[in-house]
Amino acid sequence: MAIDNKIPENVKIIKEELHIRHALEFEVDRPKQAWQWMQSTRTIPDANDWVRPEVIEAWRRCLEDHHLPLGISARWPKATTNIGPVELGQQLRHIEDLIKHLSHNFTVFLQEARVTMVLTAADGRLLYATGEKQLLSSLFINGMYDTGANWHESALGNNGIGSALMLKKPIAFQGMEHFLNVLHPYTTVGYPLQDEAGNLLAVIGLISNHHDCMNSLFAFLHLICVLVNTNLPLALDKVAQERVLEQIHFKAAKLLPPINESGLTEPMELLIQKAIKLQAHKIPILITGESGVGKDHFVNLLKQAGPRKDAPFIAINCASIPRDLIESELFGYEAGSFTGARSNGKPGKFKLADKGVLFLDEIGDMSFDLQSTLLRVLETSEFTPVGGSSPVRVDVQVVAATNVQLIDAVEAGRFRRDLYYRLNGAQIHLLPLRERPDKKQLIHHILQRELQAISGIETLEICPEVIGLLERHPWPGNIRQLINVIRTTLFTAPPPYVTQQDLPLDFMTELRQYESEQAALGNPIASVAALSPETANLSLSSWELHGIKTALKEADGNISLAAKKLGITRSTLYKKIDHFRLNKTGGGLLV
């Protein structure tokens, strides 16, 4: 069933705008550059440069007519203003009732497609919302789903709903085409409903976190408007509506992972599955690996996915407890067993972990005398608290971890050989970050997770050269070091770009030292500041020209980004461009 052919001639949908559904072939990345340019310069870029004319005009209205602050919607009180309920006239009440009736057929479809549908009055006040209401979490917190919430362009910046009611025509925006950054993750589409005289009655809008579904959103809104404005059989036949919906292709939205999501890659997933099988048969597990590789995180994942996920999980770091207290920490003590003991005694970690998992981290630092006691407990599942006389029986799965070679400690006489083989029922070795086959995937996952954590503060973009440096670094401190470097960089880098100059000095020193060592060994590796044969003997002026051309090329003509890369102001860079007669992309000299 063709939707376009079902609109009667007298329906007040502005048909000349329907071609938008078939002409949305602009570049998604260009609005990003345009928005960042506007935020940096407080000027509107030319429409021919980066974005559609509709976006340029919308941004101009936001700046000059609505006087909205650039970029950060959280600083704008009107974005959360509720201007009160709407007094519904007969026509508007009819539209609202019809939309509510139709939504019974469409709500499941909207939720599965992760799309929110809203209906607003002609002044932008919200009348009704349905579909995936958790989609706009930041707006939901600010009450944007409450009846009477203000969706007008003057309050929320350009968006499909607010701009459609201003222009009285269908319109859509996606991603960084929105003036306020709170809408950057979304696509918004709006269709106006008018009476026979052309007066605006209401706006129906859709919001999605897809950036490739604008045609589908227009098609769906087209269908809704047909149903609202006609008494065609389609409007009354649920089966016919479902047949039309089958022709509207939505791709399932790919949600960003939550901040605390494990982000398991395939190699790590295989290790977890192996450990789960071992745990199911109570085979002791010894986890080895350098400091910072995430041994404790691995054990937590194992516990959450294993057969004892609902039982206690007790962790103890054997290196952080004085040797004379380890026994009382592990096995507890009876009342009055030593000076300073609690009057009612204290249960040990083994008792607390009964029916669950006990994680002994840095097991290699356990005192030699206590090792024999631990061996006996592992073999009999019984222990006697300090100062006690009766043994206590427990059911505990012990998982041990160490960053030292226990077999070397055994040979040196620092660790009992029988305990080593008792703990080492199966050994799982976690590779250092520099050797992991999923190194790049893991770096990108953590980078996106940390970016998401600060997304409500400022909009940041990571330059490709920074990502390349993160991927090439040897990471002697492993994942712990990676997280610290990324957090430090993101929180200290001035927006909107994170460049090489924002990385910590010790990070760059480690990378240069590592690449020097690799070069001395004859291993091919990209250098932080590699010199090509053409640049090895340049004059100072030629070096300056080379640096400017390289920065402009890497920034793809973005003057603000290139200036930051060079460590100079934009005005200085413009003077250099003029002096060397360069174009904005650094592609060559102008004649």
Image: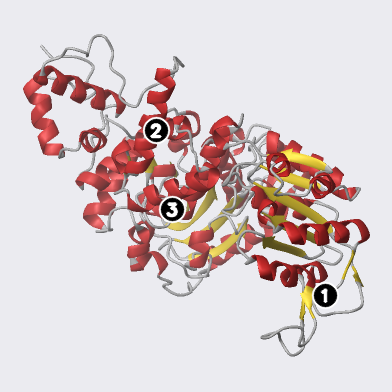
| SS for dot 3 | loop
* Mark 2 or 3: the one toward you: 2
Please name the amino acid that badge 1 sits on. Pro
- State the residue position of label 1: 385
Q: In which quarter of the image is the N terminus?
A: top right
Dot 3 or dot 1: first in sequence order is: 1
Q: Identify whether 351 is placed above or below 273.
A: below
- Front residue of 3/38: it is 38
- State the residue position of label 3: 455
Q: Residues within 10 Å of mark 2 (few under 14, many from 20)?
A: many
| SS for dot 1 | loop
| SS for dot 2 | helix
| Location of residue 78 in the rendering, given as x and y in whole percent from the top left corner | 35, 67
| Location of residue 370 in the rendering, given as x and y in whole percent from the top left corner | 76, 61
Please name the amino acid that badge 3 sits on. Ser
Quarter residue 213 falls in: top right
- Give yes or no for contact between labels 1 and 2 (Cβ–Cβ under 8 Å): no
Report, in whole angstroms, how far the alpha carbon at label 1 lies from the one at label 2.
51 Å
| Location of residue 169 in the rendering, given as x and y in whole percent from the top left corner | 41, 45
Q: In which quarter of the image is the C terminus?
A: top left
Q: Residues within 10 Å of mark 3 (few under 14, many from 20)?
A: few
Please name the amino acid that badge 2 sits on. Leu
- State the residue position of label 2: 511
Q: Identify whether 96 is placed above or below 266.
A: below
Dot 2 or dot 3: first in sequence order is: 3
Residue drawn at (48%, 74%) of the image: 85
Report, in whole angstroms, how far the alpha carbon at label 3 lies from the one at label 1.
51 Å
Relative placement, left or right, of 484 versus 334 is left
